Amino acid sequence: MEYVLNTDGITKIYGNHTVVDHVDMHVRKGDIYGFIGKNGAGKTTFMRIVSGLASPASGTMELFGSRELEKQRQRLGTLIEQPGLYGTMTAKENMEVVRRSYGITNSHAVNEMLEFVGLSQAGKKKVKNFSLGMKQRLGIAIALFRNPDFLILDEPINGLDPEGIKEMRDLLLKLNQEKQITILISSHILGELSKIATRYGIIKEGVLIEEFQAGELKSRCRRCVKLVVDDAELAAAVLEDKCHIVNFDVPKAGVLRVFDRIEDSWEINRDLIQEGVRVKESYLAGQDLEGYFMDLLGGESNV
């Protein structure tokens, strides 16, 4: 498996506060990696470190399999916090400034990029009069100007209206599928993130607590009867032989998730107890995406 980003123990400390705490992140080539955590969890700081805008206190990093970070960062495009735009200029004028600063000689590059992000009709409208969605798309256009292989986006859909969210979602899918750009994206809007992410990383109080594929998330959110027992091996045998249930799994020691006959949970408990299994807990589990992440992160604060 080819990795675009590998970090090992990346840590950032401000004063006595550890903002990013020994983060090991693995972003594979072709991923749309959804980076999730509450406000203040360390998402933006970590992205700034990867982009070279901040230095870690400790830890190492590889970009595109190399530790020559300055060289490899030339293959990055970033939109972290608010895009730096000139409000009194048009979209085209903003892009012209960037084109010249990058030394890009192709005079058609600006129009091509504005068309790609859906801003070719912005005309003489000043950026200060743009909607938030238009500003975000212009910021992405600037991030794309040097044809990056890896795009890092911090909350690009935060504050957008439903139409703007859909436009941004379609743009990101287009970048990933047509231009083969790997994307690391943080977002508060979990339902939208689930429509595009292929992999997730969950950060809590600076610690990356989990990484998993999108397909695994669907299984984790699936409705089931969760059983906590003293003997999972015996419980599994009872489920198969007496309850005639094969659709279950054992995610960790002493815990089973039963996906069939959910409405008959009392009968399942009865059969387990009769066969000598001590059932410590039995309850319905599974929820929507947001509920799952809230359980992981704790509380109901903004993700």
Image: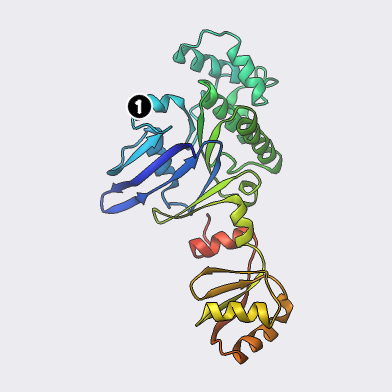
| Whole-percent x, y for residue 299 in the image | 51, 65
| Whole-percent x, y for residue 191 in the image | 64, 51
In the displayed structure, 295 sits above or below 126; it is below
| Whole-percent x, y for residue 79 in the image | 50, 33
Position of 229 compared to 246: left or right?
left
Q: For the point 60% across and 61% down, which residue is it? A: 220
Q: Nearer the viewer, residue 179 or 104?
A: 179
Q: Which residue is mark 1?
A: 70
Position of 214 compared to 298: left or right?
right
Q: How many marks?
A: 1
Q: For the point 65% across and 38% down, which residue is it? A: 169
Which of the 4 image quadrants contains residue 60?
top left
Q: For the point 56% across and 39% down, which residue is it? A: 156
Position of 16 compared to 164: left or right?
left
Which of the 4 image quadrants contains residue 30?
top right
Position of 115 compared to 135: left or right?
right
| Whole-percent x, y for residue 300 in the image | 54, 63
- The answer to whether one can see residue 131 in this image is no
Look at label 1 and name its amino acid: Glu
Q: What coloring was used for the rendering?
A: rainbow
In the displayed orientation, state which residue is furthest to the bottom: 274
* Mark 1 closeness class: few <14, some 14–19, many ≥20 residues within 10 Å: few
In the displayed structure, 42 sits above or below 235; it is above
Q: For the point 54% across and 62% down, which residue is it? A: 294
Q: Secondary structure at mark 1?
A: helix
- The answer to whether one can see residue 288 in this image is yes
Q: Nearer the viewer, residue 289 or 93?
A: 289
